[in-house]
Amino acid sequence: MVTTFLNRLYRWLGKPTARTPDWSALTRQNARCQMLVRAFYAFLTFKIMFEQDLWLSFMGRDSMEPLWPVWWMGSGSPSDLHVQLILYANLAAAILVLILPQFRALRIFCFLAFLQYVAFRNSFGKINHWGHLLLFTSFLFIFLPSGWHKLKPTRNAKAATSMIIGSCIAVILVTYTMSGLGKIIVGVMQASQGQPNSFSPDSLARHIADRMLETNQDSAFGDIIVNMPLLGWPMMMATIYFQLASVFVIFRPELHRFWGAIHLLFHAGVYLTMTISFNNSVFMLSLFLLASPFAPDSTCPFGTLTRLPLIGRLFLKIFPTTS
């Protein structure tokens, strides 16, 4: 009975259409995972070095309310020595782990240094999510198995490496599901009180107008949506669907590239309408979904539609031969 329930749950979440890959397929998959790990640390190093221009402004801040990872810095105005310690340790850790990612001690050092950096930047009254995906990924990479970097790792090492990369993909997708779920919960609460909400025809136009008033900046397409709010309603509904359903894509590797492309378009749309950039998210989507090591080498466009979470059965009736 339990087995039957688990099988049904597995099919509902998205049972893969292809058979379990053989060991030769796992070898190719592992090579892609190895490249992905190195690409991640390369971006992390670039990101830290790119932000060196901000370091002077970090040293001049005051009214610090330290988060728990940087409790040792104390409240008020942080010491320049403490700030420099965090910044230089973070830079050194990123460079070292980029050169020698096979050493677990360096991966731990990188995570702890980046944790201090993210906590410090968020210790001034506002939590910014810019570094959280990078932080979660650097934590998961600590658990890469011994020998993961070798040209011919053991089968267990290949399987464990794939599991870690799969966990990173899951974390990314779950964050989007949380965002979509938040929009629905808040929208239902607002609708129950007779307020404009996420499901209103002018919901996206209201978001854009509020952002333009807050920043006093124009955007490439913001005025168009504000003046013709009905144009934004399908976009808002599509955003809620693709964000909410992201958790199901964890179990559907044939949708990884498609889902990554959809969310890249979403972030591009956010920037073009509200001038909000998500550089880190764009990179993580590109690396872990568009370049997913688990995605099949080729997919049928119509077959992809039939695998869409929640609404795929509708397309299956339209394109029955693609299942």
Image (cartoon, grey):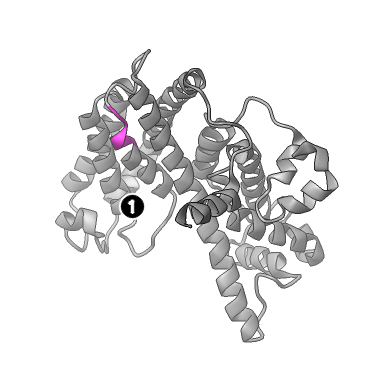
Question: What residue type is disc 1 on?
Answer: Arg
Would you say the magenta stretch is mainly helix, strand or loop? helix
Residue 122 visible? The answer is: yes
Q: Quick one: label 1, few (<14), some, or many (20+) residues within 10 Å?
A: some
Looking at this view, is 304 or 262 the one in front?
A: 304
| Towards the viewer: 54 or 133 | 133
Using the rendered image of the protein, determine whether residue 50 is visible from the camera's viewpoint. Answer: no
Tell me which residue sits at (58%, 43%) in the image. Answer: 15
Give the extent of the magenta segment.
Answer: 141-145
Q: Which residue is mark 1?
A: 121
Residue 91: which quarter of the image?
top left
Q: Nearer the viewer, residue 37 or 283?
A: 37
Q: Is residue 99 magenta?
A: no
Q: Is residue 286 left or right of residue 110?
A: right
SS label for mark 1: helix
Residue 119, above or below 193: above
- Residue pictured at 70% horizontal, 61% vertical: 236
